[in-house]
Structure formats: structure tokens, C-alpha cells
Image (cartoon, rainbow, N blue to C red):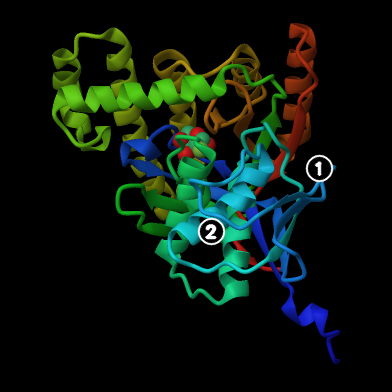
Amino acid sequence: MIQPAEEAFVTRWFAPGRINLIGEHTDYNDGFVLPFALEVGCTATISGRAEDWSARSLQEPDAVVVRRSGLSDAPEVAGWSRYVLGVLWLLTDRGVDVPPLEIVVDSDVPTGAGLSSSAALVCSVVRAVDDHLGLGLDDDAVFALTRDVENDAVGAPTGGMDQLVSLRGRAGHVLLCDMRSHATRSVPLDLAGAGLAVLVVDTRAPHQHSDGEYGARRRGCEEAARQLGVPALRDVAEDDLADALARLHDDELRRYVRHVVTEDARVLEMARLLDADALAEIGPHLSASHASMRDDFRITVPEVDTAVDALHQAGALGARMTGGGFGGCVIGLVPERDVAAAGDVVRRAFADAGFNEPALFTAAPQDGARPA
Ligand code: GAF
């Protein structure tokens, strides 16, 4: 079939949101994470029909049109469009002569749920721009650009896990990521084979102060590493934890170190269990991760803790909050046949506590970014 001439210049990429199975707030400590890519995601469509640079979202009313520029002379645009245009600003700064482009994004990742709608957005745009302009960026350069957009163009001090799994996730697998080298390895997560499901509870808890608290945790971890004389908390071995804690005088910093060091160990142990085909044994590590986030790192909220408790009551093998914290989603590892009943227990617990009604769905690992 002969394509209409205009269609030949259209490039379209999809990139997914993510669930993190385990490894929270370890990425910016150069540690380990074990996330997987979701079915929901963002599709970016690029054409060269625009006058200048134009970004449009099918979920937002207004298109944003800007003159071509680098980051330092970029206009103040807010929200989703900063992630889109940020890609073009940073490429310009790196010497790429980006021509006029129209970028249209269409996402079904719920925003504010902690499922990385922003990583899906920026990864779909970077992949589409790279492809459309024939830049030939390799995988590491693509990842670095997506992370830089979030850190430098948007100004969010996040650690890179979300972009890495949105780009490199693989169906049926979790992605073991070393966040120092950015080396990744797919580890099987055969939920159906084990008769298990990951039940996701979107608590719909209002995100309060999440940006400021996230940055405060990151700064606290960096300060603890400085006081311990290591490049990052990843460099504190679990066997040396007691000694490291004894050397810190601030109780808050001690809690952060205990969370990060034990969380890194849990990630590696879970990867080992999954490699050994022992999926049914990971539950206690999920629950220990949650306790560490609740009691030491202190990033949970009542809705999140209620969902975890309800999942345990309903017979989940393990349950934990996933993502940056202060709201968002909880995951429970639940026998497939008990998913509906577990959902009812969670809904009842939320109603009894007077919380918003949660949204519930199951999730299994999907492929990362791909042409659409
Ligand atoms: C957010 C951040 F974007 C990630 O980089 C990571 O730090 C996560 O919170 C917590 O593990 O999703």
C-alpha cells in the first residue's frame, strides 16, 4: 500500500509506566532496584508539520508552541509540556540542530498514582525524537537523556530507575538494575506459573509535600554518605551496618542508612530467589521493605499502611508500598484465586477508615519502549 506522503514523516513510539517490585529510594544511592514495565503507557507521535516546536497532549486542553532554543533561554512552561520540550532543549544544548517538530502525546498512565507517568512521557518522546531525526543514540545515551530531562529540565531530583525500566523492561521479567553502572539484567517473574498475581491498590491518597520530602530524603542520604566517608550509601555493606550506625549521631540519618542498606540487601536476595524459581518465597521481603519504609524511612501515609495491613489480613504472601511514597500505590503478592476477595477486604478497610475508594487492578511485567 502506498502511504500518503505526510504519513511517511510520522514517527510513533510507546513507553510504559512502571511498578517497582522492590528497591525504594535506593536508586539515587547508587544501589539496586527490581521494577517491571506496565501495560499502560504513553505514545508520542512526531511529525515535521509544525512552524516551530509544538507539543500537544490528548489529555490536556492546550497545545504549547515555543521558539527553538536551548535550556538556558527556554520559556517557563509548566507540567507535562516541560518533559516534552525539555528533550528538545537538551538536544539543542548538545549541538543537535533540532528542526521544527510537532509532538503529540497520548497517555493512559494515571497521574499522581506513583506509576511513573512522567517516565512514560519522557521515554516515549526521547525514543521518538531519536528515531525521527535519525540521531542514532545508543541505549546508554538514550537513558542518560531521559534522566537529564527529569533532573535538569524539569528539576525533579529523581534517581533514574523509572526511566531505565520504561526503556528496558521485558515481558515476563523484572529488571535488576545496578544504579551505579546502569547495567541491567532481566530476571523471570512467572506469576501465572506460580498461580500468583500482583494486586495493585491505587490508594488515591492525596500526595502531600511529596516533592519536598523526596528531596529531603535524598539530601539526608547524601549527608550520611559524606559523614561515613563513602561515595554513596550503596558502599556500606550490610555486615558493616551496625558499625556505620554507631558512627552517626543524628537519629534521622541513622534511620535513612538502615533503610537503604537493608533495602539493597532485600533487592539482591529477591533477585536470587527469582533466579532460583522460588517466587512463592519473596513475600516476607516485600513486607519487610514496607516496614522499613514506614518505620525508618517514614515515607508512608495512613491510606498506604491500611492497604498493606488489609492485604496481609486477606492472605497476601507479602505487601508493600511501591514508588516514591507519601501516597500512590501498594502492591500485594496474592494467590490468583484470592484476588477478588482480597480486593473486597481492601475496599472495606478503606470504607471503614473513611478514605477515598481505592482503584484495584492486577499487573504483570510487559515490554519496555517500542515503536507503535
Ligand atoms: C520515584 C523516583 F522517580 C525514582 O527515581 C525512585 O527514587 C523512586 O521514587 C523511589 O524508589 O519514583
Say which residue appears at 72% left-offset and 71% top-offset: 48
Tell me: residue 101, above or below residue 113. below
Disc number placed over residue 161 in the picture, else none: none
Provide residue 61's location: percent of width, then percent of height: 85, 42
Does label 2 point to a residue whose CB lies under 8 Å from ligand 1?
no
> Marks 2 and 1, how far apart in space?
24 Å
Amino acid type for the residue under numbered disc 2: Leu
Tell me: residue 366, above or below residue 303. below
* Along the line of sight, the residue nearer the viewer: 196 or 180: 180
Q: Residues within 10 Å of mark 2 (few under 14, many from 20)?
A: many
The answer to whether 71 appears left or right of 245 in the picture is right
Amino acid type for the residue under numbered disc 1: Glu
Tell me which numbered mark, 2 or 1, is placed earlier along the sequence.
1
* Along the line of sight, the residue nearer the viewer: 136 or 365: 136
Tell me: residue 141, above or below residue 284. below
Provide residue 282's location: percent of width, then percent of height: 46, 38
Say which residue appears at 73% left-offset and 78% top-offset: 9
Disc number placed over residue 167 in the picture, else none: 2
Residue 87 in view = yes
Callout 2: SS: helix
The answer to whether 26 appears left or right of 282 in the picture is left
Provide residue 304's location: percent of width, then percent of height: 61, 20
Q: Quadrant of the C terminus?
A: bottom right
| Disc nearest the viewer among 2 and 1 | 1
